[in-house]
Image (cartoon, rainbow, N blue to C red):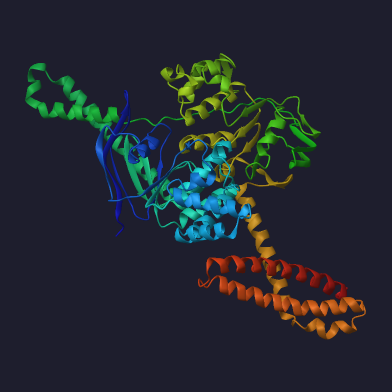
Amino acid sequence: MAENLIGIENVSKRFGDRELFNGVSFTLCEGEKTALVGTNGCGKSTLMKIILKQEEADSGNIIYKKDLRISYLPQNPEFVAGETVIEAVLRNQKETAKIIRQYEEAIDKNSDEALILKLTHEMDRLNAWDIETEIKRTLSQLGIKNLDEKVENLSGGGRKRVALAAALMCDSDILIMDEPTNHLDLAMVEWLEDILSNQKKAILMVTHDRYFLDRVCNKIIEIADLQAYSYIGNYSYYLEKKEQRREIEERTEQHLRNAYRREIEWVRRQPQARGGKAKYRLDRFQEIEARLKNKRVEEDLSLKQSKSYIGSKIIEAQYISKKFDKKVILDNFYYNMARHEKLGITGENGSGKTTLLKMITGETKPDSGQIVIGETVRIGYYSQELKPEEEGKKVIDVVKAHADVVDLGTGQKFTASQLLSQFLFSPSRQQDYVYKLSGGERKRLALCEVLMSSPNLLILDEPTNDLDITTLAILEEYLANFPGNVIIVSHDRYFMDKTIDHLLVFKGNGIVKDFPGNYSDYRIYTEVEEQKKAEETAKNNKSQQEVPANSYKQKNPSNKKLSYKEQKLLEQLNIDIESLSKEKKELEEIMSSGTLSSEEIVEKSKRFEHVSNELDEKEMMWLELSEKAEA
C-alpha cells in the first residue's frame, strides 16, 4: 500500500470577506501524480503555498511524512543576484556546482595536469560526472546551452526553464509545480510529459494543459464550492465523474428547494404563540435555508460572436524575409490567408512566431517583401502582456479608453462596466488597479480590451497562459463560432485542436511548414513520415550489411568505371572500415565496464572521438566510390 506523504485535514482559508475553501481534506501518497484544478480565484495556488508552508491556513492541519523532501517549481521563480545557470540548478548542492564549474573552466583554459587531476578526483568523490551529464541533457532539452550564463540575463521564459530543471534535478519525495508547461514549446512539453510519466516520485501540479493532465496525472483534485473533490483517474475520467456529480447535486438542490418551500409555508401558517411547540421544524427550516445560501453558483463567462463584415482579402504575406543579426526568422515566405480561416502557428521558442504577428500588426517591419492587409480587416491583437502604462490605471478605465459602449454585433450593446461583468469582474473589482490583478484576471481584461474594438480578425499570442480550464473551454467555443478570421500562437495542443483548421509550423532557420489541419493531424502526419524514414534507413542498412566487407575487393579491380588508384583506394577503405568498426566497438565495451580510472576515461574518450570521426569520413568516401562504380 502506498505510503501517505502529506495529509491535508479540514484546512480553511479566507482573504478578508472572501472565503476560498472551507474544511478541505485529502492525501498525497507515494507514486501519485495529482493535479489541482478549478476556476481562477478558487484558491489552487494558495492551497499549494499552504502545503509548502509559505502561507498559513486559518484552520485545520497538515501532516507531513517524517523527513519529507519537497522540490518546488513556482509560477514566477526568483534567483539570487549573479547566480549562474549551473549554480541555480544545483542550489542545494553548492559544493557539486562549484567543482563542476571549476572543472569546466580548467578544461576550457587547458590548465596544468595536476589541477585537472585534482578536480577529476573531486568529481569522482561527489559523483559529479553523472550529475553534470544529466544537467546538460536536461538543460539542452529545455533550450539552455550555457551553464555559466547569469540567470538574470535570460528571458522570463528562460528563467522559468532553469527553475524547472532545478526542480527536476532535486532529489525529493514529491515534486510540486505551478504551471510547469508555461514558456515551453511543444517539443519541450512532450519531453516533460515523458519525464514525469516515468517518474517514481509523487507529483502535485497546477496546469491548464489538458493533454498534459490526461497523459501525466492519475489523480485529480477539484476545488469547487469551497470544497475539495478527489477523483482517482486522469483528466478524461475526472470530466466524466464531474458531470455525474453535477447531476446528483442538481437533483439534491431541487429536493432542498422543494423542502424549503414546504417549510416556509409551514412557518408562515403558524401563529407566533405556537412557535415554540415545533422548534425542530424551525431548526430544520434554518438548516435548509443555510444549505441553499451556501450553494455557490459557478461563475460563467459568456461571449457573443461579432457579425461584422470581412471581405475576401484578409492578409497576404508577399515573399517576406526577416533576420536578427545572423539568425534567420523568415526566408522569402509567402502566405495568403483565406476568408474565415482559423490559423494556428507553432514551433520552437525563438523561431519567429511572435515576430510574424508583430509584422502583421505593423509593429515590426520585414527586411524584404511586404504584408498586405485587406481594407475591411479590423485587427484585435491579444498579446501576452498588458501595456506597462496600464499598470497604474483602474480596470474600468482601461476598458473605457477604447469606448464607453460597445456593440458586439448581436444587436445587444454593452457599457464598459457591463462587459467587464461578463468577464467576471465584480463592480468593486472594476475599481481596483491593474497591478493588483492576478495572472488570470489580467488575461480576461486583455480579452475584454480586444473585444471593445469589435474586430473581425483576432490575433491571439499565447492566450491560454494563466486562464483556468473553465474559461478556456468557453473561449474555445467562442473562437470556433467566430465569423471572422483568427490567428493563434499557442503551445496548448488541446486548445489548438479545438480552434484551428490550418497550421504553420516554424522549424527554425526561416523554414516554415504549411499544413492543412489541426495539431493532432500534424502529429499523425509527422509520425507517419518518421516511420517511413526509419523503415527506409533500416532497409538501406540491411542492404549494406548483406554485402560482404571484401565484396568490392573481389570485383573492383575489373571495374572499368574506376581508375586504378580509385580501385586500390576502395580496397583499402574496406580494410580500414572493418578495423575501425572493430576498435570502436571495443572502446564502447571498455568505457562502459566501470573498471577504468579517471585518467584512462579521458584517454579512451579522446580516442573514441577520433575513431568515430575517422570512421565517418572513410564510410563517406567508400559510398562515393561505390556509387561511381555502380553507375
Q: Can you say which quadrant of the picture contains the C terminus?
A: bottom right
The residue closer to the viewer here, 338 or 545, is 545
Q: Can you say which quadrant of the picture contains the N terminus?
A: bottom left
With 84 as the anchor, is 530 left or right in this view?
right
Instruction: Examine the image and state in which quarter residue 244 appears.
Output: top left
The image position of residue 558, as x and y in percent, is 90, 84
Task: State the residue at coordinates (29%, 37%).
Answer: 252
Q: Give the residue at the far top of this rendering.
A: 404
The residue closer to the viewer here, 60 or 520, is 60
Task: State the residue at coordinates (28%, 50%).
Answer: 65
With 371 as the anchor, is 6 left or right in this view?
left
Task: State the residue at coordinates (55%, 20%).
Answer: 390
The image position of residue 250, as x and y in percent, is 33, 37
The image position of residue 26, as x and y in percent, is 30, 45
With 252 as the anchor, is 581 left or right in this view?
right
- Residue 330 higher or lower than 447, as above or below: below
The residue closer to the viewer here, 122 or 225, is 122
The residue closer to the viewer here, 369 or 609, is 609
- Residue 374 higher or lower than 72, as above or below: above
Count the numbered circles shown: 0
Residue 521 visible in the current orientation: yes
The image position of residue 64, as x and y in percent, is 28, 47
Instruction: Examine the image and state in which quarter residue 400 appears.
Output: top right
- Residue 261 higher or lower than 157, as above or below: above
Residue 210 visible in the current orientation: no
